[in-house]
Amino acid sequence: MDAKKINALLVSIDRGSLTAAAAELGYTQSGLTHMMNALEDELGLNLLVRSKNGVHLSPAGQELLPQMRALAAAASALEEWAERLRQRNFSTLRLGAYTSVARQWLPAVLAEFRHTCPDTEVAMDVGGIMEIYDSIKNDKMDCAIVSFQESLCQGLSWVPLRDDALVAVLPGNYPLESPAFPVKDFTDKEFLMPSACFDLDINPVFSMGGEKVSPRVRYTNLDDAAIVSMVEHGLGVSILSELVMQDMNNSVRVAPLSPPAWRALGIIMSERRQNDKNIKRFVKCAHTVINRMYRGEREKEKKSM
């Protein structure tokens, strides 16, 4: 049932005149009369008594009046909530990221975004892989910068940003025979697995090239800084990423892996939200800023080729 017809009827009763109601609602009198006739046909009841002095409710209309007012109020409340959601989606971007991304990338990205979209607020949260992917799927976040996980990305859109090299994190006195740390040397080592579900990024390293590497894994659910501190104190070895290790001042040895490995960092969002104006602007800002950050590195790579 069209709530607009119910609302028009209620305005007509309150004003006591189809002419007055039509003028207030922006209809022609014939158009409003047609709406009232259509509503009565739909219900199979005569709701209005029309006379030269105006209109009033019939006995059937009087009985239905509480329900009609309730329906009109419910429709108005629905539209009000929908408008709040539209305004929220327009003015607030709910963003998720890893701690390392929030520390190294987001300040510059958000500064660019604020310059581009000064009227859009950003609500930001950090978390682990599963937590962030679930938040996107459950519409608790609009988009997030995470590592690509094919098994988790079903039904989501993915925009790549940069490959973040994984590195071995070793005690400061660890003897390295070459600049890179052979992945096979993790076998039988006490391995400190970082925060929850980071193993989704790390475990593929142990089976690269078809060779199965078997460290003694200790699942810690600790943050990055705690993992590095534990390695520093000789409690094991670990794998983190260059972005994570950036600006870490602990006395540890950091070495690239051999063979090399990466985690692919990018932006995820719901497929139905990929054309959202705020998300598209954020993606553009992230690309601009991250390309600017690593421009010198790319130029060095070109010169060495």
Image (tube, rainbow, N blue to C red):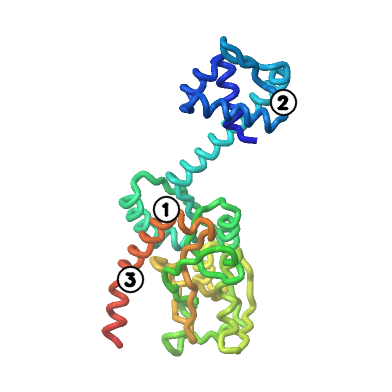
**Local secondary structure at mark 2:** loop
Q: To which residue does mark 2 refer?
A: 45
Q: Identity of the amino acid at label 2?
A: Leu
Quarter holding residue 246: bottom left
Q: Which mark is residue 247?
A: none
As rendered, which of 60 and 201 lies closer to the eye? 60
Give x and y (percent) for residue 217. 63, 75
Give x and y (percent) for residue 5. 59, 30
Q: Are marks 1 and 3 in contact (CB under 8 Å)?
A: no
Q: Quadrant of the C terminus?
A: bottom left
As rendered, which of 69 and 49 lies closer to the eye? 49
Q: CA distance from mark 1 to mark 3?
A: 26 Å
The structure residue drawn at horizontal position 50% and vertical position 66%, both measured from the top left corner, is 158
Which circle, 1 or 3, is nearer the viewer? 1
Give x and y (percent) for residue 274. 48, 59
Taking the image as shown, residue 74 lies to the left or right of residue 177, namely: right
Give x and y (percent) for residue 192. 58, 72
Q: Which mark is residue 294?
A: 3
* Mark 2 or 3, nearer chain start: 2
**Local secondary structure at mark 3:** loop
Q: Quadrant of the N terminus?
A: top right
* Mark 1 or 3, nearer chain start: 1
- In this rendering, the answer to whether 147 lies above or below 110 is below
Quarter holding residue 153: bottom right
**Local secondary structure at mark 1:** helix
The structure residue drawn at horizontal position 45% and vertical position 89%, both measured from the top left corner, is 177
Q: CA distance from mark 2 to mark 3?
A: 72 Å
Q: To which residue does mark 1 refer?
A: 277
Q: CA distance from mark 1 to mark 2?
A: 47 Å
Q: Identity of the amino acid at label 1?
A: Lys
